[in-house]
Amino acid sequence: MSAASIPDLKRIEFFPGQRLTAQDLTDVQDANRQLRWLHNRSLHGWGIGIGYGVTGEAGDTAISIAPGYAIDCLGRELILTQPATVPVPAVAGVSAGGNTVAATFFLTVSYLDDSFQATEESRPGVCLPPGTVRLTEGPLIQWQQLKDIQDGMNVILAEASVLNCQLNAPLGLGARRNARPSEQPHIEAGQVPPAAIAWVQVPGGIAAAVDTTAAKFASTPAYFAHVMGSRQIKVVPNPALPSVFQMFSLVTVPILENATPGGFVMQVVLLTFNNANQVVAVDAKDIPNLIPFLEWTIVWMGIEG
């Protein structure tokens, strides 16, 4: 979390004889809420805290949601106080190769601002029009497709396969995220193929950004990474003259920098052997010629907790 996400808070005080207005009391509520949200996003992960059980079997046209408590990535509470029933999306499916197959939807909850909450109680004012004094507390519950989900803003409760306006299979719970710290370390690993790596030259070698957002780390993990592939690199400056080439026998030293929950920068120090069989740095002017011929895969692992 960056310092830019810390709200500009004011301590609110009162004095004997002060005339209180509705705005004064609203400001107290708002300050306490901002502090609570700051606490949540600073010290807790986002996701489901408790409850939010979902029930739906193949053939159902509606699913049931139990009361629950979740937190989004801004620290805002997503509270469902009463059981809810949500109809399955009214879609026949999606077309694929001339056939209709099941469509995939995700059931999510999101924060609803006060302006969208229903009025529970209002009272007449003193010589003024009536006003709201109680609002409901509830999240926005909706079906979304994967491309429309904002990670951290929309908390996934279940995945549904929908065909002919009903569930084609029991609800899937694999996409749910727990806000509570795991009792076991969260370990994920991945590979970045050569075609997906954009190497750039840096002092002493090369570097590339590695995206790990798919692992959904809640905090910055301990990353380990290396490059996999041949260290014997044949550089052909002119494809029209394949017989004119330069061979490099490389020694690589990986360095990981700028680690975040969503990725890191992989730097590789490039070393080679000179005529005396000594290990020396690759000449900086040779690195741009080397990069197009590197068929390396970045292999990484992250351990959180």
Image (cartoon, rainbow, N blue to C red):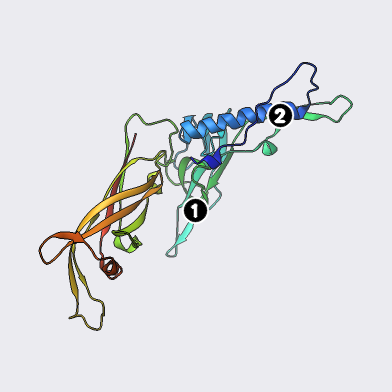
Residue extending furthest toward the left: 276
| Mark 1 element type | helix
- Which residue is labeled 2 in the image? 26
Callout 1 crowding tier (Cα within 10 Å): few <14, some 14–19, many ≥20: few
**Does the rendering let one see residue 15?**
yes
Res. 194 image quadrant: bottom left
Q: Residue at x 25, y 60 (%)?
A: 296
Which corner quadrant of the image does residue 143 belong to? top right
Nearer mark to the viewer, of 1 and 2: 2
| In the depicted structure, whether residue 25 falls above or below residue 54 | above
Q: Position of residue 181 (x, y in %)?
A: 40, 31
Q: Are marks 1 and 2 in contact (CB under 8 Å)?
A: no
- Amino acid type, label 2: Thr
Residue 14: name its quadrant: top right
Report the amino acid beneath label 1: Lys
Residue drawn at x 56%, y 32% as measured from the top left: 37
Of residues 96 and 37, the one drawn nearer to the viewer in this rendering: 37
Residue 5 in the image: state x and y as whole percent.
55, 40
Question: Residue at the location (77% across, 27% down)?
Answer: 22
Helix, strand or loop status at disc 2: helix
Q: Residue furthest bottom?
A: 240
Q: Position of residue 94 (x, y in %)?
A: 48, 57
Q: Is residue 5 left or right of residue 264?
A: right
Q: Tell me the residue that label 1 is attached to.
A: 147
Residue 27 sits above or below residue 301 on the image: above
